[in-house]
Amino acid sequence: MQGTSRQSSKMASRQFALACLVILSACLPCSWAAGEVAEKEHASEVMAKAKRDEEELKDVFKKEGEEGAEGEEGAEGEEGGEEEGQEGEEEEEEEGEEEEEEHFSRRDFHDSAMLIGAVLLVGSLFYLVNWPDDDIRLYTQKIISSTMSIFSAVLMYQGINQLVEPVLEELNFWIRCLAQFVHCSIYIFGMQLVIANFSGILGEDKVDLDDHKWTIADGLRADFSRELTVQEIETVRKKEASRSVWVDKRGNEVPVSKLKVNLIQRNRQMRCWATLLAHMSGFAAINAGGWMQQTDTFRGSPLTALIPAILTQVVLLGLFELAICYRQSRFNALSGHHQNFRRAALCRKYCLEAEDDVCSLSCSFLMVQAARFATSGILPNVEGLEEPPEQHPWLGILLLYGIGILGSAMSVLFALTGEDEEEEDDEHDLKEMPKPPSRGARFWGTAVDAFSMVFSWCLLFGTRWIFERLKEDTMETVAGRILLALTLSIFSGMVVFGLDGIDDALRARGKAKAASKVIGIIINALAILIGFSWESCFDVGVAAVSSNVAHQRICKFSLGTFVFVFLVPAWRRHILTKEIALEAMQRDRRKGLEDPEESTRHLRMSEQPVA
């Protein structure tokens, strides 16, 4: 059976690889179509102009001929008439042939290729999110979730920053850096308050986190996961059990189950807003450190450009120490009830994860800025773009890739040698309030995430340099950025299947813990890579849409707000829930839990509706 499953897995992997190549081949023409259309239009204009000049010359010659002798005029007129008649017939034949050959324009070809590529891409995602292997489904959900959270948060941040920048334009660089750090601190303290509010540590929270409620467990129903009303509970057959059957108004028997709905909803809410506000805080810190790098004090050499990355971390760690003191004071103010212990543990968990995300995101980007300065001799601007853009030698591209590989190796090394901090189990009672985090464990965890993100940034910008070498001004167009994102997405899909095979092989040799750490780091790095590559596409798309309006900053803010409000609920309810469920199933499986009912319970727990 194992051999058969492995063979089917290999065949499925090959089918996926073939499908990815088809997607790439279908989408490749899209990136160049816009340029080809422009070139063709320019060529047609040149030909039309040449025809007009030729006709004007014929008119001049004709007038000069009329002033000459009548005999010569007649002869020339007859010859000219015959020639013009022949030319006219030839032109009509050529136009007819062109009309038959070019029934579809280049724009039609561009749109058709884009349509086919989009359909194939969506179909591939459906294959991956429904893959038989739980790990493949988890990795896919992580990548999709990271992509949606990143560009939702970054577009919202950039929209707000569009309103902040006009106020700071007249200030000098140092005052602007200080203002950006204040901007970043607002997001950080907002993140702390939101997490504290959802965890319930801000006041006397009377919600019972252990309260089990009946919910619909039929995944084919439109009201799947809905909580039953008091009247509906009366028709549940075995009210004392954890799973039973409810009879609806039509007499249908519907499976139902008891779940801790309040705890599930709060976990999801905290995970959602901690992730979004951490991304926004991280980009605000990047902006502050980026402006510091642009000052004359630090832009002189790659070594001095690295100093703002360290100073940014010092400021962030100072803010996080204040946040830790505030959290511990709130923990101590709570009563000694076991549910308050759980609320405090949840708040601590999500706050520390968000703080590590902010530090690693800002530190990795600023370090890669300095690395790009060292390899190319050009310090990119605050947004990571080079002004003016230049083509880089292959040696510089290979050096940047080498720095990324070194970053991934350092990340794996830190992960394997660092301290393992115990995770709080939300399903069991805690005996005491959580203590402040170990600074050594926090440093190790931040270093692991930062070096893995260094790999992502280097791979992103190195591939961008390759595309700029292949064709000038490719990255200045929307199509070029989409092609870059598609290429990196396909590459990441291939790597995911390879990592899953390595994971299975290491687990067969009894090295499950090391495999889990290493593969988890690489998957997170790939998720960040794909997320920021697609965010770049949306960023230039928003700029293109707002380029023809009078108030561009307000338009960018409105578009960012609309995308944020539209996508975040869908991401939280339908994508983040699946990610949480698959993480729970993988965690239980790796702990040696093989009870299928217990895994199903975790899947159901994470699919409850959000209030």
Image (cartoon, grey):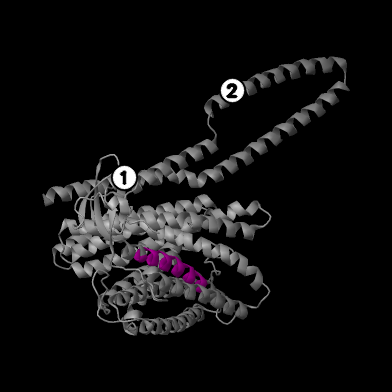
For residue 128, above or below residue 428: above
Residue drawn where x is 44% and y is 46% of the image: 28
Which label was assigned to residue 221? 1
Q: Is residue 546 magenta?
A: no
* Span colored in magenta: 266-286
* Magenta-drawn stretch, dominant element (helix, strand or loop): helix
Q: Nearer the viewer, residue 81 or 182?
A: 182
Q: Are marks 2 and 1 in contact (CB under 8 Å)?
A: no
Q: Amino acid at mark 2?
A: Gly
The residue under label 2 is 96
Residue 98, picture quadrant: top right
Label 2 secondary element: helix
Q: Is residue 269 magenta?
A: yes
> Could you tell me residue 441's position as x and y percent?
31, 81
Q: Nearer the viewer, residue 81 or 514?
A: 514
Nearest to the eye among marks 2 and 1: give it: 1
